[in-house]
Image: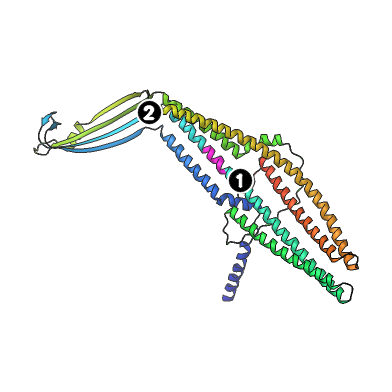
Amino acid sequence: MMKRLFLIIYVIAAALPLSASEPWSVERCMQYAADHSHGVRQQQFALEDSRAVKTQAIGAFLPSVYGSVDGQINFGRAIDPSTNTYTDVSTLYNGYGLQASLVVFDGLQRYNNLRLAKANVAMGRSGVRAEKDDVALKVYKAYMDLVYCEGAVSQTAKKRDESRELLRQTSVMAEVGQKSEADVAQMRATLAADDYELTHMQSQTTKALLALKQQMNFPIADTLIVEKPSVDAPLQSSDNAYNIYNVALKTNPRIAQAESSVAAARYALRAARGAFLPTLSLSGGVSTSFFRNMDVGGHAPFCKQFKNNAGEYVALSLSIPIFNRLGSVSSVRSRRIALDRARESLNYERSELQRIIAEAVADVENSAKEVLKMQDQVEADSLAAYLTTRKFEEGIASSIDVRTAAVTLLQSRAKLLQSQLTMAYNQRLLAYYKGEKLWTDQ
């Protein structure tokens, strides 16, 4: 029984590292970054603040109700509350009141402030989404950089193994007199160069992994293994930048954020103009009191005075602004400038979006052409490297020729991988501007 229990514990413990080291897809990395990014959290705090301001704007339409309690003791000459005449005895006085007031009309300031708060909430939502998308694109780029480094390490390690095998063959051929010691020394130099390049690329891979973790706000000490994405995606046909731009105007969060900013500035201007109009307020309340002479007894009981002294009132007041030291004029002017600034920012975002989309379309087309050209170049360099190696084995080519051909093939393969990853990134970026989600929330 104990043996079986230990076996179960061992199996569970052995399975934990496997689940912890499960490869992460790029979509999972983007979603993690969107949920844990510091920038996204700051935008979410700003959104919550806008929602609190909206609640306050809604509360401005409700009446304000407040109660009051006061007490005082008069010494010497004072008015006797029972006879309303002067007296020189000490008097204790308590007052109680309950008042309510409601603004009936204030030049639509509350209405425009409410719409301003709603526009700020909408702007906050767009800001959160825009920040998430920006973080996701940065993570996607860092992810592709890491995949490139890992691919370069794999290719460099393969070339290092080929150089080691070629060094062994050259050493054997030198022992039988078919190769010189110079050829052996050249092959050792080639192997040493490959070892250095492999070490260098491993260092670059470590830096790329740290950069990805930083973009994701992922714990540095935790293990993160990424899966290799498919880079053999079909080449997309040419897209019309103008059509994509029209779609992006309706779906891009930066545009929505800028439009909400214009709406907020417009309502703020209207609220400022409302300060020039009169304000009509309605108020009402009840009050009562209790008093007693401190020097003479015989006052009425508290309950009786509380009931007999009770009174109610209703008031309607009209406040007409005449002069407030140019405060309203300055406020209107300032908010008009803010509206013009928001409109200019919206125009800038639209023109910048149009430029980015046109650039993305061109990048997709150019990267697709580069992939095709690099595929042809890799095939040609592979054949050249193979023939050069065969010639070296037959004594026709030199060791320098072999090294040059191998280095050229390695560079071509690295450029092909980089071109494929660049094309994948450009295609994902263009799909984003077409309205597709960067990742799907789990």
Residue 167 is left or right of residue 118, and the answer is right
Crowd around label 2: few <14 · some 14–19 · many ≥20 (10 Å): some
In what element is the residue under mark 2? strand
Q: Nearer the viewer, residue 430 or 316?
A: 430
Q: CA distance from mark 2 to mark 1?
A: 44 Å
* Residue 58 versus residue 398 in the image, above or below: above
The majority secondary structure of the magenta stretch comes to helix
Q: Which residue is mark 1?
A: 134
Q: Which residue sits at x=84%, y=60%? A: 385
Crowd around label 1: few <14 · some 14–19 · many ≥20 (10 Å): some
Can residue 150 be seen at all in this image of the molecule? yes
Residue 80 is left or right of residue 103, and the answer is left
Image location (x, y in percent) of residue 323: 37, 24
Residue 191 is left or right of residue 304, and the answer is right
Which label belongs to residue 103?
2
Q: Nearer the viewer, residue 200 or 15?
A: 200
Residue 209: name its quadrant. Answer: bottom right
Q: Earlier in the sequence, mark 2 or mark 1?
A: 2
Q: Which residue sits at x=51%, y=38%? A: 121
| Residues shaded magenta | 121-128
The amino acid type of the residue labelled 1 equals Asp
Which label belongs to residue 328?
none
